[in-house]
Image (cartoon, grey):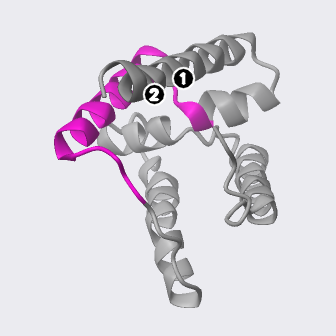
Amino acid sequence: MTIDWLHFTPASAFAGGLLIGLAAALLILLEGRIAGISGIVGGLLQPLRKGDVAWRLAFALGLVAAPMLYQVLAAMPQSRIDGGWARLVVAGLLVGFGSRLGSGCTSGHGVCGLSRLSPRSLAATIVFMTAGFVTVFAGRHLFA
């Protein structure tokens, strides 16, 4: 494995991580809510409390609107996906199943849970990172 130093952008990666951390911190400080995307979107599909939809909808719309705004201000980076539609659909379903099974996703456990020093989030993050490493290895080297 080699790093493409020509396209390595630590400054933008740091800025993106800083913005994610700031957004997660503001949501928990101002609203008392965890910025876990699967929980936020799941709460849109099955609201538990009255008045719980507006902030969730605003958060989800912001996730969609941010890349659109970026595209207006700057050129979008090129992306390359090495899998076909079938692989993407299966991967998406597995991620959705895993986030329900683990009671959260990478943003809820990996960003918010670890920052709160949650042992449950540490265990979940270790499990989903390990599963991701194994899946990528198997997909690229065993079943390619």
Q: Please say if 63 is above or below 83.
A: below
Quadrant housing the N terminus: top right
Q: Which residue is mark 2?
A: 136
Q: Position of residue 21 (x, y in %)?
A: 76, 49
What amino acid is found at the position of numbered circle 2 in the picture?
Val
What span is colored magenta in the figure? Answer: 80-107
What amino acid is found at the position of numbered circle 1 in the picture?
Phe
Q: Please say if 66 is above or below 80.
A: below
Residue name at image x 70 percent, y 36 percent = 111
Residue name at image x 50 percent, y 82 percent = 71
Q: Position of residue 44 (x, y in %)?
A: 37, 45
Instruction: Look at the image and say whether residue 106 sits in the magenta stretch.
Output: yes
Foreground pick, 19 / 129: 129
Quadrant housing the C terminus: top left
**Would residue 97 be found to the left or right of residue 72 on screen?**
left
Q: Position of residue 94 (x, y in %)?
A: 32, 25
Q: Which residue is mark 1?
A: 133
Q: CA distance from mark 1 to mark 2?
A: 5 Å
* Secondary structure category for the residue under label 1: helix
The 10 Å Cα crowd at callout 2, few under 14, some 14 to 19, many 20 or more, is few
Q: Is residue 142 visible?
A: yes
The 10 Å Cα crowd at callout 1, few under 14, some 14 to 19, many 20 or more, is few
Q: What residue occupies the far left of the structure in this picture?
A: 86
Instruction: Look at the image and say whether residue 24 sits in the magenta stretch.
Output: no
Residue name at image x 41 percent, y 23 percent = 141
Residue name at image x 42 percent, y 51 percent = 53
